[in-house]
Amino acid sequence: MEKLIYVIGIGPGDEANLTGRAIRALQESDVIVGYTVYVDLVKEILPDKEYMTTGMTKEIERCRLCFDLAREGKVVSLVCSGDAGVYGMASPVYELLPEYDDVDIVVVPGITAANSGAAVLGAPLNHDYCVISLSDLMTPWEVIENRIKAAIMGDFAMALYNPSSRKRADYLQKACDIMLAAGAKPDRACGYVENIGREGMQSCVCTLAKLRELSVNMFTTVFVGNSESYIQGNKLITKRGYR
Amino acid sequence: MEKLIYVIGIGPGDEANLTGRAIRALQESDVIVGYTVYVDLVKEILPDKEYMTTGMTKEIERCRLCFDLAREGKVVSLVCSGDAGVYGMASPVYELLPEYDDVDIVVVPGITAANSGAAVLGAPLNHDYCVISLSDLMTPWEVIENRIKAAIMGDFAMALYNPSSRKRADYLQKACDIMLAAGAKPDRACGYVENIGREGMQSCVCTLAKLRELSVNMFTTVFVGNSESYIQGNKLITKRGYR
């Protein structure tokens, strides 16, 4: 009996951004598991499937539920927003796999907010870039601080995930201060996108100094250019090279 | 008259990894432009379209061709492998846009090799990560060297693009030496994927010390874990957090 879990990145949220491979894996599945918000998005595409949801912070329970369902002989899809392998469920599933080593795992990639947001803003990540989450739920703040510093030192373009939450209203400001202290100029070209691929999507370009003053919501992905990035109209452009 | 260029990322190469949005934009196009290899992949999906190709290093000519075609009233798709905004054509198109400001640009994101390769290897980029190209065609080697150092200092997981070519056979070795000198341990967990999403796809996990000894081909994406990444069977896993 095949025991199979697909760990699927559904992209930024609308059906059009799913890959054919993701849709086929969902169609092939007997049950689709995920956090409520993402499951609701998939339900709109495939209303007749069996769905099971768990709360936002219940990642490990969600993974175990998938393994248990797979052992019952069901083909399971575990859905994540964006890419399953970027702050997603791919790694907790693999971490638990040694306890369930009769189950097969297939990760189906999706478009992560760094890239879907970049497309909205123009070309902010068109050269070397890094992706940093400002959430300190699972990572000590000193590690995050060190990463932001290193990103400036290496002159990377950046996509910042989780720039804000109710408990962390000033984290984007702190991140900008770290960048400025590490040598980024206040006129560094930046931008952000809210609600990528969803209703209410909007984007904005600004300087790093301006970014520092903003309060963005939790559905925002922030982009910081490298030292040669520039703003052109309402777009943020990072050149392909230095020559 | 609408003058429109779609700049489309087609993902790693097989039809299944295209998004619905990318397929719809291609269908809507009168002419599809790109480097021969990527155009051939799209031809298999939509054989009845008009296609125009230019050589690999002719990026600016390719962009100008698209603008000229758009001005003739044709809906144009410019196709790129992976994501159009990651070492892709999005930024040269925007750089030329001021000369053709009657033309509209829409970037359609695709899955870049960092994420499609990560899905094959398990979960190597499941925490903060950076993407670095080892090609010094358009970037001075000192900039690349500095980025690799910064990536180790910031303890990022990494995806390395263009790890090798005929003229740069030893660049991956040089990159590994920079990492080791910057403090990465020789047993740092690494991996690589060849021919992602194409015939002959294969992946391998290894230590950084072993990676240094390898000769990979130009169709390879290399992954370097952060200091807490680990190898489990034939997978490379980076945990979601440190707690």
Image: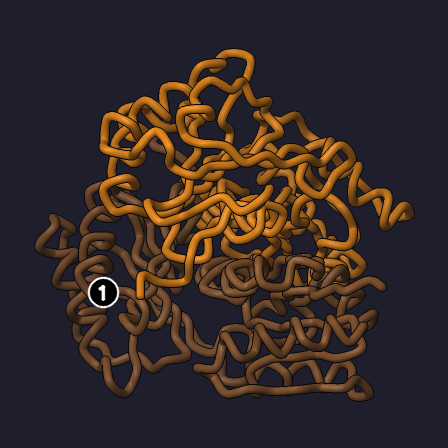
Chain colours: A brown, B orange
The quadrant the N terminus of chain A occupies is bottom right
Residue at 48% across / 39% down in the picture? B223
Q: Chain of mark 1?
A: A
Q: Residue at x 18, y 51 (%)?
A: A149
Q: Residue B31: x and y, percent?
A: 77, 47
Residue B36 placed where, x, y %?
A: 73, 31
Is residue B56 in view from this perspective? yes
Front-lying residue, B135 or A28: A28
The type of residue carrying mark 1 is Pro
Name the residue that disc number 1 marks.
Answer: A140
Residue B18 quadrant: bottom right
As drawn, is A139 to the left or to the right of B26?
A: left
- Tell me residue A36's x, y (percent): 57, 87
Res A238 visible: no
User: Residue B136's image quarter?
Assistant: top left
Closer to the camera, A167 or A216? A167
- Mark 1 Cα-neighbour bin, 10 Å: few <14, some 14–19, many ≥20: few
Q: Nearer the viewer, residue A23 or A157?
A: A23
Q: Is residue B106 left or right of residue B150?
A: right
Q: Is residue A171 left or right of residue A181?
A: right
| Element at label 1 | loop
Q: Note whether B170 is above or below A54 in the view shown.
A: above
| The residue positioned farthest toward the left in the image shown | A181
The quadrant holding residue A67 is bottom right
- For the point 49% across and 40% down, the residue is B87
Indicate the position of residue B6 as horizontal and vertical percent values: 64, 55
